[in-house]
Image (spheres, rainbow, N blue to C red):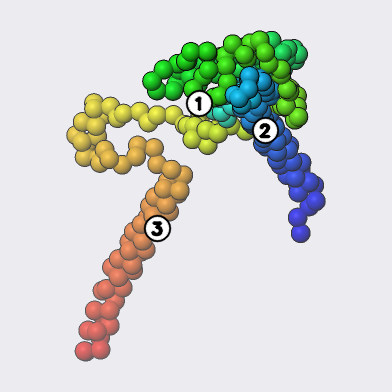
């Protein structure tokens, strides 16, 4: 049976590694969720400009998206996703610097949507979106009274005779929540990122491994002149030395045995011949 002490020590050494890996994955997931919420909410309609046209023209509605009101939010969300990818590829001080940059992105996202959105900003964004849509229509931009083709509205009416309706769902606060998640992710990466596992550590060359030195040509020629094989290792291992010593001892014992046998045969040779002669007599 094994003693419980070493088992407890091994479990104690494995738990921090597993905890660091779990913390690493949860932090990256929180940052990805925050950046995805920012990108999704910035593409939604935050407000709508309603213009009542004179009869018989229909009433026009122009939706204004969050990226039209706060264009920096979407760009910062993409930058946060790129920062999370950089966290996977960095280590040590570089990873901490990336974490600080992520926190800066999150602060900028939260600051860009913290200010209230006014009706003038919504009308201005609607005019810009309508003009861009009119420019994308082939064959012209505006006609006669300022009506934009394909929209059924008037650019002048958007700025004057219109009222603003805000979206029922608070997408702006969703962007703020995503920015806070990005801030928390960046702070955790800057604080704990150096202890987390890295992607490419298993492919790094160990520092203890040294390059093999090239053989000296002079020593090769000297070995050849002495009748030695230069391809064999100059420093035999302990096992080879033991084996060579054992074989040498065995060969020495065999030589001694053969010498003893030859001496014995030399001592009893005349006696045998004499015995043979005596028998003959």
Is residue 227 left or right of 171 when viewed as pictured? left
**Callout 3 crowding tier (Cα within 10 Å): few <14, some 14–19, many ≥20:** few
Res 274 → quadrant: bottom left
Looking at the image, residue 112 lies above or below residue 228: above
Q: Residue at 64%, 25% (x, y): give it.
A: 59
Q: Nearer the viewer, residue 191 or 73?
A: 73
Residue at the outermost left position: 225
Q: Residue at 57%, 16% (x, y): give it.
A: 154
Q: Nearer the viewer, mark 2 or mark 3?
A: 2
Residue bearing mark 1:
150
Classify mark 2: helix, strand or loop. Answer: helix
Residue 272, percent across and down?
Answer: 28, 79
Res 35 → quadrant: top right
Q: Which label's residue is closer to the chain start, 2 or 3?
A: 2
Residue bearing mark 3:
250
Is residue 242 left or right of 88 when viewed as pictured? left
Confirm whether residue 255 shows in the render.
Answer: yes
Residue bearing mark 2:
33
Q: Residue at 63%, 11% (x, y): give it.
A: 159
Classify mark 1: helix, strand or loop. Answer: loop
Q: Which label's residue is closer to the chain start, 1 or 2?
A: 2
In the rendered image, the quadrant that contains the C terminus is bottom left
Confirm whether residue 103 shows in the render.
Answer: no
Q: Residue at 49%, 32% (x, y): give it.
A: 204
**Callout 2 crowding tier (Cα within 10 Å): few <14, some 14–19, many ≥20:** some
**CB of mark 1 within 8 Å of CB of mark 2?**
no
Res 25 → quadrant: top right
Q: Nearer the viewer, residue 67 or 124?
A: 124
Is residue 21 left or right of 230 when viewed as pictured? right
Q: Which label's residue is closer to the chain start, 3 or 1?
A: 1
Q: Nearer the viewer, mark 3 or mark 1?
A: 1
């Amino acid at each position: 049976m094994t003693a419980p002490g070493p088992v407890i020590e091994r479990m104690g050494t494995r738990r921090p590694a597993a905890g660091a890996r779990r913390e690493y994955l949860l932090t990256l997931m929180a940052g990805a969720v925050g950046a995805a919420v920012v990108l999704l909410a910035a593409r939604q309609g935050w407000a709508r400009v309603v213009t009542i046209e004179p009869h018989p023209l229909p009433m026009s509605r122009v939706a204004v998206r969050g990226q039209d009101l706060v264009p920096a939010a979407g760009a910062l969300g993409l930058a946060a996703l790129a920062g999370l990818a950089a966290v996977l590829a960095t280590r040590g001080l570089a990873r901490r610097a990336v974490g600080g940059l992520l926190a800066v992105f999150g602060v900028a996202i939260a600051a860009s949507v913290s200010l209230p959105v006014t009706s003038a900003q919504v009308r201005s964004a609607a005019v810009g979106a309508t003009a861009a849509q009119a420019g994308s229509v082939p064959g012209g931009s505006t006609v006669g009274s300022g009506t934009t083709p394909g929209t059924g509205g008037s650019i002048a009416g958007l700025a004057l005779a219109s009222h603003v309706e805000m979206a029922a769902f608070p997408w702006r606060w969703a962007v703020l929540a995503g920015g806070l998640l990005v801030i928390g992710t960046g702070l955790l990466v800057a604080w704990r990122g150096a202890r987390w596992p890295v992607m490419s550590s298993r492919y790094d060359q160990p520092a203890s491994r040294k390059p093999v030195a090239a053989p000296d040509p002079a020593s090769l020629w000297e070995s050849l002149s002495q009748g030695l094989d230069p391809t064999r290792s100059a420093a035999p291992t302990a096992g080879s030395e033991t084996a060579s010593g054992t074989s040498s001892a065995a060969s020495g014992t065999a030589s001694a045995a053969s010498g003893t046998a030859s001496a014995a045969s030399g001592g009893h040779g005349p006696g045998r011949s004499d015995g043979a002669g005596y028998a003959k007599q």
